[in-house]
């Protein structure tokens, strides 16, 4: 089963992910790629409890996830990949040949250096450049918080 | 009939349900079924209220208020829709037009909420220093002012909804056949909305089977009752 | 005790200052105020810091926010370093949002409304609507009261308390209830809408419903239910205007 959702969202696992996308896509597995969370037990406990019983949750480092992308894409579980930072996704994409085709910007909030692109998407110039690099490698990139709203393309965000 | 006192009460009720949706107290008053039932009681026609609530709730069940995503604000429009249908000799002629009014107001309501959230963000940024210094009075002032702003937003939406409703009561939907067809089409669109939402929100696993089982039971109940 | 009650009431307005800058942060600060009063007597500086932290960025489900409010308050009294408190506060946002969205917005809310819809479609009057509101609110009050007290008891250990709670089990059941009851309601409401209609009108209603579902499949996110309804209403008006 190809990877169904590949999302950058600084809130990581929340309602939009487990209900908004999780239910219509019928997700069975969420891979949370974040080096800090992967090394932090109490944060993992919190995220684990937020995921419904029918979804398996895997915590991975960028390296670990890069090694296993093809494996996840190859087995029958309906999978989503989640990162909290644009750069993390950039690293995954750089290590990946064809498993991550569409990148979803789900929510990146205000932070020094970032400017508002949508009320719920703030990007710095570096992040925008990194997204452009991903787009040039053939990935389709758009911002869309939940499936019921219209997607906004990367060009429209710039 | 609907007099001045009833209109003022409807105005107050529309404002309350608009504030209930996000600000407070968030106790389902903003749901069309609830907003309409009470509006019907105020207008002296509970039956019309329940009928309007039943129809509009189909749309409201489509998109759940998940996360910070944007959703229509059905409350004030529902109150307006009840005013359209209340005490009409043949409600069926008016239901579709009333639903149209409610949907237009609901979509404007969503836009007004976006605006409000930006407006409050500017207020918060303007007081960032006081917040950073732990100024409790500034927190209190910002919070209460914001609720006040939401109330003004709700009041404005309700005024628009009620004026449109009074206008609609004067002009009517062309003729009886047109009115009936509008109601029929609104009902069909509502059914599409609720089915779409139910399937999306159930997903693919066990919940979908429960949904199907429920629908089966509903069909049986419809046939035998 | 009085402070806890006061904070619990204030949490009803948690989202009153919802905004794109701090989301419900200011609302959290408003609710935290009575809880932090005793800290002022212990140390005014510490109190000011705690108040400032209480209004930082925050977002979660409004009915479960008490877990975070309670835990952070307890941590402030326990003299936990500020950066750790903020880290806990931020880490709680998404999980509490996910839990509350599943339990209430996608669970108990559609369950309560679905049951009320089904009853009204079968001819029940307004008391059934009132009953749905009251039952939902009773559960909400019970949960939000539990949340605030549990948060205050556990402080930095709130994650463990959430993990050991019955929330996940409740979510599974609420999800089943929502699907089942909305499922029951749909055919009943459809039947109710058809009352008093001539057969061709019933056929038209079903046709519009099917058209909406098909269009929804085809048009993706450009489709929204209110927009489809308004377009369909406009088509009727246009057709009737041409015909007369």
Image: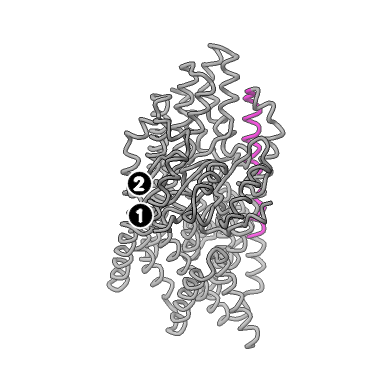
Q: Position of residue A123 (x, y in %)?
A: 64, 44
Q: Residues within 10 Å of mark 2 (few under 14, many from 20)?
A: some
Q: Magenta: predominant secondary structure element?
A: helix
Name the residue at 44% across, 55% down.
A3
Whether residue C160 is visible, yes or no, is yes
Q: Is residue C209 above or below residue A154?
A: below
- Quarter of the picture containing the N terminus of chain B is bottom right
Q: Nearer the viewer, mark 2 or mark 1?
A: 1
Question: Element at badge 1?
Answer: loop
Q: Position of residue C96 (x, y in %)?
A: 44, 39
Q: Which residue is more in the foreground, C196 or C23?
A: C23
Residue range highlighted in magenta: B134-161
Whether residue C96 is visible, yes or no, is no
Q: Quadrant of residue A116?
A: top right
Instruction: Give whichever of discs 2 and 1 has the lower sequence position.
Output: 2
* Residue at mark 2: A56
Name the residue at 54% across, 53% down.
A103
Q: Position of residue C63 (x, y in %)?
A: 45, 40
Q: Position of residue B224 (x, y in %)?
A: 27, 72
* Residue at mark 1: A77
Between the C-alphas of marks 2 and 1, the distance is 9 Å
Q: Is residue C122 above or below residue C241?
A: above
Report if the CB atoms under discs 2 and 1 are less than 8 Å apart.
yes
Label 1 lies in what chain?
A
- Per the rendering, the mark at residue A35 is none
Name the residue at 57% across, 18% down.
C47
């Amino acid at each position: 089963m190809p990877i169904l959702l590949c999302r950058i969202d600084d809130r990581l696992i929340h309602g939009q992910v487990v209900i908004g996308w999780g239910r219509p896509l019928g997700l069975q597995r969420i891979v949370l790629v974040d080096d800090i969370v992967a090394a932090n037990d109490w944060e993992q406990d919190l995220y684990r409890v937020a995921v419904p019983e029918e979804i398996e949750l895997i915590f991975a480092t960028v390296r670990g996830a890069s090694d296993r992308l093809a494996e996840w894409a190859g087995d029958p579980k309906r999978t989503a990949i989640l990162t909290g930072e644009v750069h993390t996704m950039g690293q995954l994409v750089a290590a990946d040949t064809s498993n991550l085709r569409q990148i979803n910007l789900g929510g990146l909030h205000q932070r020094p250096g970032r400017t508002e692109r949508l009320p719920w998407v703030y990007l710095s110039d570096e992040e925008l450049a990194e997204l452009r690099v991903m787009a040039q490698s053939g990935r389709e990139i758009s911002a869309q918080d939940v499936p019921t709203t219209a997607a906004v393309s990367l060009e429209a965000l710039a | 009939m609907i007099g001045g006192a009833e209109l003022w009460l409807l105005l107050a009720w529309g404002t309350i349900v608009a504030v209930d949706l996000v600000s407070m107290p968030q106790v389902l008053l903003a749901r069309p079924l609830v907003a309409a039932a009470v509006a019907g009681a105020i207008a002296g026609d509970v039956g019309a209220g329940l009928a309007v609530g039943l129809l509009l709730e189909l749309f409201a069940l489509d998109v759940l208020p998940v996360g910070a995503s944007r959703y229509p604000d059905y409350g004030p429009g529902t109150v307006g829709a009840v005013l359209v249908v209340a005490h009409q000799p043949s409600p069926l002629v008016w239901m579709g037009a009333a639903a149209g009014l409610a949907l237009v107001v609901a979509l404007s309501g969503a836009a007004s909420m976006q605006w409000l959230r930006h407006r409050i963000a500017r207020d918060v940024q303007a007081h960032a220093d006081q917040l950073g210094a732990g100024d409790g009075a500034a927190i209190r002032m910002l919070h209460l002012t914001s609720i006040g702003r939401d109330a003004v937003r709700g009041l404005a939406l309700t005024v628009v909804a009620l004026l449109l409703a009074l206008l609609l009561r004067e002009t009517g939907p062309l003729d009886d056949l047109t009115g009936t067809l509008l109601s029929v089409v609104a009902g069909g669109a509502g059914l599409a909305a609720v089915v779409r939402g139910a399937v999306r929100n159930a997903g693919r696993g066990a919940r979908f089977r429960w949904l199907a089982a429920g629908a089966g039971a509903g069909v049986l109940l419809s046939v035998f009752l | 005790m009085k402070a806890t009650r006061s904070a619990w009431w204030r949490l009803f307005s948690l989202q009153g200052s919802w905004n794109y800058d701090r989301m419900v942060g200011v609302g959290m600060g408003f609710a935290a105020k009575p809880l932090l009063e005793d800290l002022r007597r212990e140390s005014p500086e510490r109190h000011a810091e705690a108040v400032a932290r209480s209004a930082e960025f925050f977002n979660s489900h409004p009915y479960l926010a008490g877990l975070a409010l309670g835990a952070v308050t307890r941590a402030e009294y326990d003299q936990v370093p500020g950066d750790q408190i903020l880290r806990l506060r931020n880490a709680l946002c998404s999980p509490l949002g996910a839990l509350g969205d599943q339990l209430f917005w996608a669970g108990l809310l559609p369950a309560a409304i679905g049951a009320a819809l089904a009853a009204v479609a079968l001819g029940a009057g307004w008391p059934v609507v009132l009953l749905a509101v009251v039952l939902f609110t009773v559960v909400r009050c019970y949960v939000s009261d539990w949340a605030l007290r549990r948060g205050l008891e556990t402080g930095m250990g709130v994650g463990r308390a959430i993990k050991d709670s019955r929330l996940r089990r409740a979510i599974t059941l609420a999800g089943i209830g929502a699907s089942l009851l909305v499922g029951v309601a749909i055919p009943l409401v459809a039947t109710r809408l058809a009352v008093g209609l001539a057969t061709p009108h019933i056929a038209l209603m079903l046709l519009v419903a099917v058209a909406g579902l098909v269009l929804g499949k085809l048009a993706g996110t450009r489709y929204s239910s209110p927009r489809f309804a308004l377009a369909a209403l406009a088509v009727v008006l246009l057709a009737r205007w041409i015909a007369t």
